[in-house]
Amino acid sequence: MSADDLPADEVLDPGPRQAGSDQPPTKPRRRWPWITLASVLLVLAVVGISGLFVYQDALRARDSLQVAADALPQLADQIRNHPEQADATIAQVQSAAHTALASTTGPHWTLAGWLPWVGDNTRAMQTVTTAVDRIASEALPELSTSLQSVTPERLAPKDGKVNLESLVAVRERVVHADEVVGQALRDVSGIPRTNLIAQLTDAVEHLQSELADARQLTSTAAAAVQVLPAMLGADAPRDWLLLPQNNAESRATGGIPGAAILLHADDGSVSIVKHLDNKDFGPYREPILPLSADEMRLFGAALGHYLQDVNLTPDFPRSAELARAMWAADGGTAEISNVISLDPVALQTMLKATGPVKFRDPEGHLITLDSTNAASFLMSDVYRSYDSPEIQDAVFALAAQAMLKQVMSGNADAGVLIDAITEIAASGRLLVWSADASEQGLLDSIGVSGALRGTTATDQGTAPVVGVYLNLSTPSKLGYYLRLRPQVTGVTSRPDGSQEFDLTVRLSSTLAADAVDQLPERVGAPDPPRGTNRVNLLVYAPSGGSVAPLASDSSGFVAQHDGLMVSAQTVVVPPEQTEELRFHIVTGPGQPATPQLRVTPGASNS
């Protein structure tokens, strides 16, 4: 059938023809490939131009961030030593941060963010500049104002009273600054690293590390300004129990509490109310508080019967609860809100700030302690100078009381005192407990709660915590000569984020063999042979992990304590000898960061 045979309404209209043309009509051209190609070229041109702008902006942002980073060390020095100069430097940092943020915004950055691979890098850059800008605009001014208001000189006690008003005045500022730094750390830590260029990866990881260090400081400051005023009696008077520990007779958290001292805090003033020796408490018909099966197996009933044994457990909050219950039974009517513990090494460190302290012993002799002799006097010389155990314990308590009066007098170098307190807290020689759960949480964040734990948060992620603790098992003061040196080796990472490694524990005696016969009676242990340290060693595995002694002839047993596996055994260390024990540790999953050690503080910092 030809076209002429089709119905008229089914014949395609050929369109108009040129007059006189006998050529058949041309077919219409398909224009869409050219339109598509033109669109692609246009997009590529836009992307190319955007990429050029993004690249130039990124360089500008990088330079601005470097300006801000270079100014921060100077700012830290100014805030501490020349606060009147800090505002100008903060303005410089803010200007640089604002430039960096402005350089990473705009339509071309939005477009670049849609592209594969490129988008990961642009979004990472935007997260970095946003975090730095918010810290510069919000956190730095708050911290600068706060630190200028609560200088060491203003915080230091004067005439027996701490200036709480300055702490209360800056509380909201410091807490807000900590929240800003914390959010910045979370944002930067959440940046995906897989597709980042090497230079940006390094910058992000460096910033994350710096923010983690800053957060440690700001969170400590935020916790301190929230908890200290209340604990020092800003809202209502508080009663504290001070437990001076004596590391010469080792206990898991340091040494035996030689006494219990009642302190009264009221609106920043702290006074000594009452002092009792440990012999004034118990023993009780039943443990002062119910003990768990784990506690009974590891520490025995003595944990709940004697004040000097409440810290056989390495969990200081538990020790504090037991001591508080004993005070309620035998100490008096005061309701204990807080328990604090210090040891002789801590007191000696604080004497660097206060200068020498003087007091008279029960026999009327004048005693002078300073930053060179306090620890050795309280843990060794006191036993050579006094035969009576009662006088020895009394001297120990009198030294602690004299030290407290010296600190509260206002004669200390405030900056050195704050550094000293920071040092002893980091070494586990300052422990604080609160009966208030919210305060206890803040104390834990500061790092002074002494709570038993199997993991801790670090800038690398969750870190496993291995505990290595000592309890002297014979009544002696030979812990003064004992040195504990644990070491982690052979760390291997596993696919589930767990780790395995070996732990070597070295226990050494610094007591000379020819000096054993000169030891005072109360110092040398009668059994085993005189001068020989006999200690119970407890090695705690991290959360969800395990611990196993490597020696085939190892005596002892494996137990559980608050969900943590514990290897327990008795070790005998003769004079001038070193005993070495090795353990294999496996952590729980999701603990990829560097393993952390928590140990019993000894009689020496070395």
Image (cartoon, rainbow, N blue to C red):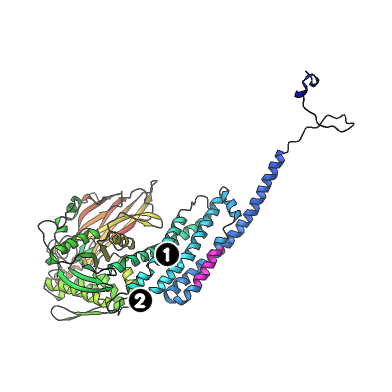
- Position of the C terminus, as image quadrant, is bottom left
Residue 92 lies in the magenta stretch: yes
Q: State the predominant SS element of the stretch in magenta.
A: helix
Residue 259 vs residue 268: left or right? left
Residue lying at the far right of the rendered structure: 20
Q: Earlier in the sequence, mark 2 or mark 1?
A: 2
Q: Position of residue 434 (x, y in %)?
A: 26, 62
Q: Position of residue 186 (x, y in %)?
A: 44, 56
Gap in angstroms between the C-alphas marked 2 and 1: 21 Å
Mark 1 sits on what residue?
177
Q: Is residue 540 above or below residue 76?
A: above
Location of residue 260 (image quadrant): bottom left
Q: Position of residue 35 (x, y in %)?
A: 70, 42
Foreground of the two, 219 or 569: 219
Residue lying at the far left of the rendered structure: 285
Residue at screen point 39% across, 74% down: 149
Residue 404 vs residue 183: left or right? left
Q: Position of residue 62 (x, y in %)?
A: 55, 62
Foreground of the two, 183 or 208: 183
Q: Is residue 493 visible?
A: yes
Q: Which residues are magenta?
A: 89-99
Q: Is residue 396 visible?
A: no
Query: Do labels 2 and 1 touch, CB within 8 Å?
Result: no
Foreground of the two, 77 or 46: 46
Mark 2 sits on what residue?
154
Q: What type is the residue that disc 1 sits on?
A: Ala
- Position of the N terminus, as image quadrant, is top right
* Dot 2 alpha-carbon crowd within 10 angstroms: few under 14, some 14 to 19, many 20 or more: some
Foreground of the two, 373 or 10: 10
Local secondary structure at mark 2: helix
